[in-house]
Every structure is written in structure tokens, then in C-alpha cells.
Amino acid sequence: MTASVAVHFPLLSLLLWLPLGGTLLCLLFRHSGNLCRWASLLTTVAVLCLSLWMAFQSLGGNGWLFYEDAAWIEPFGIRYMLGMDGISLLLVLLTALLQVAAILISWQQKEHPAFFYALILVMETGIIGVFLALDLVMFYLFWELMLIPMFFLIGVWGHENRVYAAVKFFFFTLAGSLCLLLAIISLYLIHGGQTGEYTFALEALRQTVLTPGTEMILYVGFMLAFIVKVPLFPFHTWLPDAHTEAPPAGSVDLAGLLLKTGVYGMIRFAFPLFPGAAERSLPLLAVLSLVGIFYAAWVAYAQTDLKRVIAYSSVAHLGFVILGLAAWNQLAWEGSLLLMINHGITTGALFVMIAMISDRAGTRELEHLGGLWSVFPNLSAFFLLFCLASLGLPGLANFSGEILVLFGTFKAQPLWGGLAVAGVVFSAAYMLRVVQSSLWGESKVLQRSDDLGPREWLILIPLALLVVLLGVYPAPVLDFLREPVSLLLATGGMP
Amino acid sequence: MNPLLLFLIPLLPLLGGVFNACCGSRLPQRLVAAVAVLSVAGSFLSSLLLWPLGAGEGTRTVLFSWLQSGGFRADAGILFDPLAAVMTLMVTGVATLIHLYAAGYMEHDENQARFFALLNLFVFAMLCIVLADNLLFLFLGWEGVGFCSYGLIGFWYRKTENASAGRKAFIVTRIGDLFFAIALLWLFREFGTILIEQINARAVELDPLLLTVLTLLLLGGACGKSAQLPLMTWLPDAMAGPTPVSALIHAATMVTAGVYLLCRMFPLVSLSTTGMAAIALVGVLTALYAASCAVAQREIKRVLAYSTMSQIGYMFFAVGVGSVSGAMFHLLTHAFFKALLFMGAGCVIHLAGNENDIYRMGGLKRKSPQVFWLFLIGILCLAGTPLTGGFFSKDEILLTAFARGDGFSAILWGLGVLTAGLTSFYSFRLLYLVFFGEPRQAEKGHSVSPLMLWTLPLLALFGLFGGLLNLPHLFGGHQWLSHWLGQPAGVSLSLGTELGLLLLMLIFFGGGWLIAHLRYRRFPGDEQADWRSFLLNGWQFDRFYEFILVRPYRTVCRFCWQGGDKALIDGIMDGISRLCLHWGGYARKLTTGQVAFYLQGFAWGLLLIVGWFLLSAVK
Amino acid sequence: MIVPLEHVLFLSTILFILGLGCVLARRNLIMILIGVEIMLNAVGLTLVGASAFWQQVDGQIMVIFLMAMTSAEVSISLAMVVYLNRRKGTVDVRAFDEMRG
């Protein structure tokens, strides 16, 4: 296991701890909101640049693109192990990009700006850590590290019903992650008992010999944490509440990034560690995701709050992602991961836009919106674009992932694939309802009537370009996914 | 010629559309219109120049690989074969004229950038359908057309009805797309490829039952886009858009996409007799249904909308009886005269002072004889007047059906002939109500811009002489289109039978005209009767769907939210948390704050431990 | 050993139970503290007895520790009693129940 790029500088650590450095800066400058703002923006931009540079460095690379391994807490066999393959690279890129958007969208944060930005940066470290960690203790550490800032973002800077939403979010995810912790420790002890070598390293733990019963129990422990985070029906009800109450940046991170960590956990940890149990669970996963696709689309149609519609649409889209995983072939997996990236960008963009809209209209209730196009043509055009991408219009981002998932799923299980296609119609129904009641019709009372400002253009243009690019030419992304996916599928293994 | 040049055809409108969408609102309106028109005209010119590439087997070329993963591959690729070449030429040609017309029609609208951007994208999407060499690229155009129609039908978005009509078009056609998508997935599963050529070549390998299912799925997709039973309700509402849009949707693009798909997949489709019968049945039933509705319509554009539906029904019928050339022939002539009629209707509406109701028109012949003559040509073609383009194409379809000779085809043929009579009736009804009699409109109309008028004569010419494209041997023609498509007509009827059928058609045409003439030459006054309003509302299909689909859907949605999410899932979660609180309440009572109470607890605990040790010691 | 171990144990048990009874029954804080002291001394007595019985010095060292700790504990707890008395004007434990749930 050697890094294919001969860089001896610990780039991964730099990437991982850079945001935390930004946090310290924020806390240092906590008396000046402006300094904090710039410090956090610069940090996120630096992370983005660094990750982009790393992506270019590793174009066409195989195996671990970057890898670090050092001793950490020797007595317990905990190591400081970080590794980045194509999948992690893409997710880190997505994280870096959306965090810049999250900082920019909350540029005018008035209450306790320093702590706000600091929390966002802490979360960035947590998320990147989850995508890089190869040691189960480190993974768990970062897994919890992203939970806490989000709890405070919702609970402190949220809207009216924030405490309920924050506590609900916290308990759902915490219940899941406790199961994860128990399973990790059990696996550690079992492995240690078998081989005498007590370690938390993923690669070593994969060699553990488990009876089918034990394997299933541990697998369920892992999966509970991930399923709640994804979230898969019926564990999704925390998401709409959390979204509704979260500040804009929180929503962007939640939909664009936190949900992805669940899927990542499945493919990196749960499936490779317990291949037998995973195989047995696939039909159940497929059923849950199919139910989720339909159910979420229906519930989304009945919503009156713009954010809730998009929140439920996330549940439906993530249903597609999990369905693709359950199909268990190269085509569907590449589609799932592509869809995950696409969904991060489109939904992130949609939440950014909802913030802009509710800022101007003073409400997010669909009934009270309307006629936005006649007042804000530019803003509305972007919103329409992202809505269309979200409903899966070919040539825009989501479609390319969705269709690969469908092809792969249909190839494996025609019934699943056929049913999932029907979900696409329902997604059109609710997205068009959103467009209809917000953009068309006569304009209503507004708080502000200025179209996009420079800062907003700056956020939207890159996102819009990416949405189109990923729809028309997703080949670069697929190239990064091909090799890791085939490895994960073949052996559940790693480079 | 470099085959890659073929990409100019779809890319020019795309570039025009993207350009207008991005910077159109900052440019003078005239420039916007010019860019739009020129890009489509350029596309038309390039398809004319590249025409030789389409001969014989055609040309296949690939620009780049769109999606490629795990054995799946979808390219942005073009298959320019005879069928595609004919269709491309028609689409770009008619679209160019419509764009020109639109430049005049939308002169005073302030949102030209959005309009022309969407119009160009519409043409681009349609060209994707026509030219695509694989089904997924075709699907891109298929959905793109749906979106553009959504944007254009709801172009005047301030009125909620318009926007709703657009949404209806999108969703109803998307239900059709669902079937198409399943067929697409299934074909990939069977063949491991989505290239149209390969699928058609290998279709014989498939199991007959599967073939039938696939054909029916493709038919479902085609029904959605082509507004055939039972997915036809969106088309009449689509009249909410500006008139050039109606012309584009009805004549050159969108509705013909379904027919084209079936023609494109004909080698596969034709292998399933059940599937073919279903296609023919759907076609004839829709033709009859739409014609019956057209008889009672009051809005000029709705009459034309139903007539389109009916004519597309004929095309389906043609495919169903196995005549691709018949379908394409009718598609072409129909494109010309229907574009003519719609654009004429736009002029009429302008002349009548933005009046849509034909009962409040009348006497327009005197106001603008020019428009009258052009419109008359369109009506003659639609009604199937002998020797016009519409006559030949319709006749060929009916002839082919008759020639098949089995009972099922005979019944369908009979219905088709009946529909032809109805068509003649409603066409002339429209003509009489609009142009003859006394003027009934309240407002004074305004004049028609010359740009609008100039585009019409060309279409009229094509409509009138479109028959020459595939003139049957009986009239001394050589059936050029059939040969070009590599499908020489297999109709072999005796001269006597053919003449007899011709006479029959003539009788039905004449009968329809006569009834219309007697009844509508002078305005008979507002008609109100129950059966009329039944037809006026399209057999109440809208209300029927509202009742059996839309309302239950809303109820299910609300139930899932309130009953499923809120009551059940959140109920369970909140229940668990309440349970914890409840038990916590009991535990709380233990902490009294009294030191003595705690000490008692110690003492009892001590006693227990001592007792335990004692007991085990005794044992 | 002159005194048999049984006697020592018996005595310390009685002392312990007396102390416990005092702690449980009395409401006066100072009396409770005295009860605690008695219990501690009972334990200390046992340790000394056991140490003598087995001829090991550990028990006695333990008791010396115990005495040191007890004196510290008494000084702190008496200081607290004085403080509590100042706050509420009483040394009745029933008055101090602010920690109830």
C-alpha cells in the first residue's frame, strides 16, 4: 500500500486539519465579525484549492491516491490512518465546494458570527475526516465531530421550533452512532481474541472470522448508524424538521454533505467488513429505498414549506442511491455515487436559493410565494435550472446518475428498476408544484425587490455550471469512480 | 463530407438557445429574434447540404461519449439515415418558417429572449430525437421537448391557468415517458446496448411475448408525446401558449415525436402482431375521438388542436397497419398544412382583435382576403380535398389498411373513413364560422405584421403540392418517399377497387362539406345542448382523470404526510420519548433530597449485601 | 493474643450498628456526624484486631491513615455544619432538601 503520487508531505493531514486551524483563527478574532468572515472564507477556499490541486495531481491514478499511517494510541491499537481513493476524493471536493457556498450564503450572519463560522469549520474537519479515516476509532471520532456543530447550528441559530428539531436530530443520529460504537468495540474484541492482535484498522478487521449470526448483529449495528444518517425510510423524519429549522448554511451542509457520510459509511465500512450479512440484507435495503422513493415523493407533494419539499426530495433521491447500492453491480454503483455527488450539488444549490428567496419574500410558505419570475428573472432562472436538475431532466446533473442507477438496477432486478422509474414521475409532480407556486403567477408582497447581487452570482454560477457539466459530461467523475468501485465490488477490498 | 458536420444541425439551435438564454435579456430584441431565426435557418441549410449523407444505409457519427460505465455506453451520436434525413429537413424547414413568423408575432412582447431561447431549445431537443443513434440520447431530446413545451405553453406565466396547462403537458407526457424509459431499460437488459441500429437488427432474437410487451411500452411512450388515447388530455390545454408555439408543437415537433419513435423502432415493433394491432387501434380510436370533439369546439385553436390529435391518430394507424412511408408521408403533409393553419389562426386572432371564440368571429374574408385564401388552402388539405397533399397521404393510409383484408383492419378502416367525413365537416365548419357571414366580434382587430404573412404562402405551396412527394402510381407518380425510405408500398389492389375506394372517400368528403355548408354558411346562433358540452369538454376526460387520479393522489399524499410521517413514525418516536419521560418521573421521585432517605437506602443495601454473603456462607 | 478475635469482632459489630442506628435515626446533623465517627471507629477496631490476630502490621498502618483522614473529614464537615447553620438557622437535615429531583 503505497501512495501512487510520490508526495511525502502529509497532504491529507493538512487537508484535514486546515479547517480546524481556521476555527482557531475565528475564535482568535471573535470580537470582529468581519475578520472572522474573511478568515473562514479564506480557509474554505484554501481547502477547496488544495483539494482541487490534489485532484489534478491524481488524475488517472490508481489505488490509494494519498495515504498516511502513523502510530497514535499504541496500547489500544489505534492508529492515525488516512487514505484517499477516487470516491473519497470526489466527496472531499464536494465538501470543500459546498463549504465555500455555505460561508458565502451566511455572509451576513449577525448573531455571534465568530462561533457560527467556527462551527462550520469544525464540521468541515469532521466531514473530511469521515471521508478519509481508515481506522475505526478515528472514523467514529469524526463521525461524532460532525454531529455536534450541526446540533448547535440548528439549536442556536435556527428558527422558531429549533430546540425540538435539534434534539430530534441529535437523538436520532446519536441512537444510531451508539449502535455503531458498540459494534466497533465488539468487532475489535472479537478480532483481538482471534488473532491476539488488538487493532482498529479497517484492513485488518476485514480478516476477522465471524459466524453468520454475529456478523449480522454487528452489521445491523453499523447499518443503523448509516441508515439514520442517509436517511432511509422509515428513519427519515428528523431530516425535514432539521432542515426547516436550520440556518441556510446548516441546510446546505446537511443535505449536501451529512447525508452522504451515511452512504460512504456503508460502502467503505459496513459492506466490506460484513460481506455475507450485506448480501443477505440487499433485498431489504432495496425494499426500504423503493418505499422511500415513493413515500417521500408523495409526502413532498403535500408539503407547504419550500424547505420541507426539498428535504423530502432528498429522501427520495437518496432512496435511488441506496437502491443502486442494493443492485450490487458496477453500473448501478457508479450511478449511485455519481448521483450522490450530483444530488449534493443540486440540493445544496436549491437550499442556497431558498435562503435567497425567503430573504426577499420574507416567507417560505408556498401559498404566500408566487410570481417571483416577474420581479427576479435572474434568480428565478437559476432556481428553475436547479429544480429541473432535481426532477431529473436529461442533460442536467441528477439525470446522469439516476439513469445509471436505473440501468444497473434493472439489469440486476427488473422489478426494482421498473418500480423506481415510476418514482421519477412523482418527482416531476412535486418539483413542478414548487416551481408553479413560487415562480409563476402574479407577484406578491415582497420585502426586497433587488435581483441577484454580486456575492450571489458568485455562488450560483459555479454551481450552475457544475450542474450542466455533470449532466452533459460526467466522464471525469466516472473515471475517478471506476477503479475503486470495481475493487469494492469484487473483494469489498481496498487498494 | 465530414460526418461530424452533422452535429451542426442540432448544435446550431442549441447555441442560439443558450446564447439567448444567457445574454438575450441584455441585447436589443431584434437581435435576439435574428439570432434565433438565423440559428435555425443555419440548421436547415446544413441539413439540406448534408442530405447526401442520409442516402442508403445512412451515416453514423459520434461526437463524444456521454455516459460510460460498466458495459453501458451512451454517446452523443447521430444516425443520419433516410428516415432521419426526411424528418430533419421537415423539422428544420418548418421550424425556420415558424421562427420567422414568431419574430413578427412576438414583436411587442418584452420577454423575447426567454421565448426565443426556449423555442430554439425546443428545436434542438426535437432534432436530438430525430437524429439520435441511441435510445438514451433520444430520451434526452424526448424529455427536453417536454420541458420546452412546459416553458412555452406557460410562457405567459402571470396567468396561473397558462402555467397549469404547461405543467399538465409536462406531467402527462412524463407518464408516457415512464413507459418509454422502462422499454429503454429492458432493451438494454436484453441486448446490452442501446444503439437503435443494433436493437432493430437483433430484435428477432427476442421472445414474442417480450416483444409485445416492449411494443406496448413504446406505444405508451409514444402516446404520451403524441397525445393519443388515453394520454391526450394535455394537448387541447396546450393552446394556452403563444400561437407560434402551438404551431411548433403541433406541426413540426413534439406530437410527431411519438410517430417518429414508432417508425424508428419499426423493425422491432413490426415483429409483434398484437402490438401492431394495439397501435392501429389506439390510432383510429384517437382519430375518431378527436374528430368528434373538434366538431363542437368553440375556440379556433382548440379545433385545430383536436384536428392535430386526430391526424396523428391516422399516422399511428398507418404504423399499425405496417406502412412507415404512409405514416411519414402524412406526417410531412400534415406538418406543412398544420403549421399553415396555426399560423393562419394567429393572423385570424390578430385580425379579430385577440378573439379566440369562433362564434364571435365571422366575415373575416372581406377584412383580409389574403389570410382567407391561405387559410382555405390549409382547410382543404386538412379536410382531404382531392388532389391536395392531405388527400394523398390520408388516402394512402386508408388504402393500405383496406388492402390488408382481415376483419380487424376492415373495421378500423371503416372507422377511419368515418373520421375522414367528420374531418371534412369540422374543417369547413371552422372555415365558415370564421370567414363567412356577418362580423360578430366586439373589438376592432389590428392588422397583421407582414413578416407573419410572408411565411405562409410557402407553407401553402408545400401543403398543396405535398402530394407529389409520394404520388401513387394511379396518378402517374413514382412514390418517391417510399423508395427513399426503402419501403416500396406493397399495396396491390385492382384498379377498380382503388377507384371505388377513391369514390367512397370523395363521397365522405363531400358529405362532410355539404352538411357544414348547409348548417354554418350563415351563423346559426349560439348552440347549447348537453351532448355538445360533452364533446366540447373532450368527453369529460379531464373531469374523469381528476376524479380517479388527481384527487386520490392528493389524498394519498396528504395521508402519507399526516398519517404516515406525522402520526405513525413521529408518533412512535414521540411515544418513546414520552415513555422515557414517564419512567423518568418515577425515578425522579426517589431523589427526595432528604439525607436520611438516602442513608436508609445505604442501610438497606448493606443489609442485602451482608445477607447475600451470609446466605452463600451457609450454603 | 489475650483478647480473642471473636470478642473484638463482636464489639466492633455492636459499635457499627450503634453508629448506623445513630446515623439513620437522628435528624440533627451533628449527631449524624457522630454516628459516622462511631462507625469509622468500629471499622478501625476491626482492623486493629485483625492485625493483632494475624501478626501483620498492615491493619495498624491502615488505622493510622484512617485516623488522619477522619480528623480531616471532621474538620471539613464541622465547618460545613457551621455554614449550613448560618444559612438556615438550623441543623436539622430535613431542612436541606434542595437537591430533590
Image (cartoon, coloured by chain):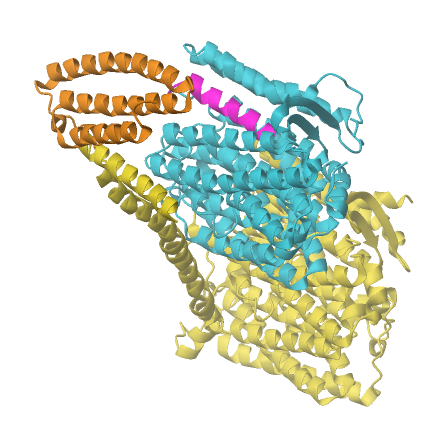
Q: From the viewer's perspective, tell me whether residue A58 is left or right of residue A96.
A: right
Above or below — where is B30 with respect to A71? below
Q: Position of residue A154 (x, y in %)?
A: 41, 32
Rendered yellow, the chain in question is B
User: What secondary structure characterizes most of the magenta part?
Assistant: helix
Rendered cyan, the chain in question is A
Inspect the magenta stretch and tell me whether residue A137 lies in it.
no
Q: From the viewer's perspective, tell me whether residue A111 is left or right of residue A127.
A: left
Tell me where residue C64 sits by quadrant.
top left
Q: From the viewer's perspective, tell me whether residue A7 is left or right of residue B504.
A: right
Q: Position of residue B362 (x, y in %)?
A: 48, 65
Viewer can see residue A356:
no
Display colour for chain C: orange
Query: What residue do we see at 60% from left, 83% from top?
Result: B511
- Which quarter of the image is occupied by the N terminus of chain A? top right
- Magenta stretch in the rendered image: A111-129
Tell me where residue B142 sits by quadrant.
bottom right
Q: Which residue ends up furthest to the left in the rendered image?
A: C89
Query: What residue do we see at 34% from left, 17% from top?
Result: C63
Q: Position of residue A321 (x, y in %)?
A: 61, 48
Above or below — where is B367 with respect to A322? below
Query: What residue do we see at 67% from left, 83% from top?
Result: B412
Query: What residue do we see at 54% from left, 33% from top?
Result: A143
A252 or C90: nearer the eye? Answer: C90
Above or below — where is B493 with respect to B154? below
A283 or B264: nearer the eye? Answer: A283
Q: Position of residue A425 (x, y in %)?
A: 56, 57
A214 or B205: nearer the eye? Answer: A214
- Which quarter of the image is occupied by the C terminus of chain A? top right
Q: From the viewer's perspective, tell me whether residue B159 is left or right of residue B75.
A: left
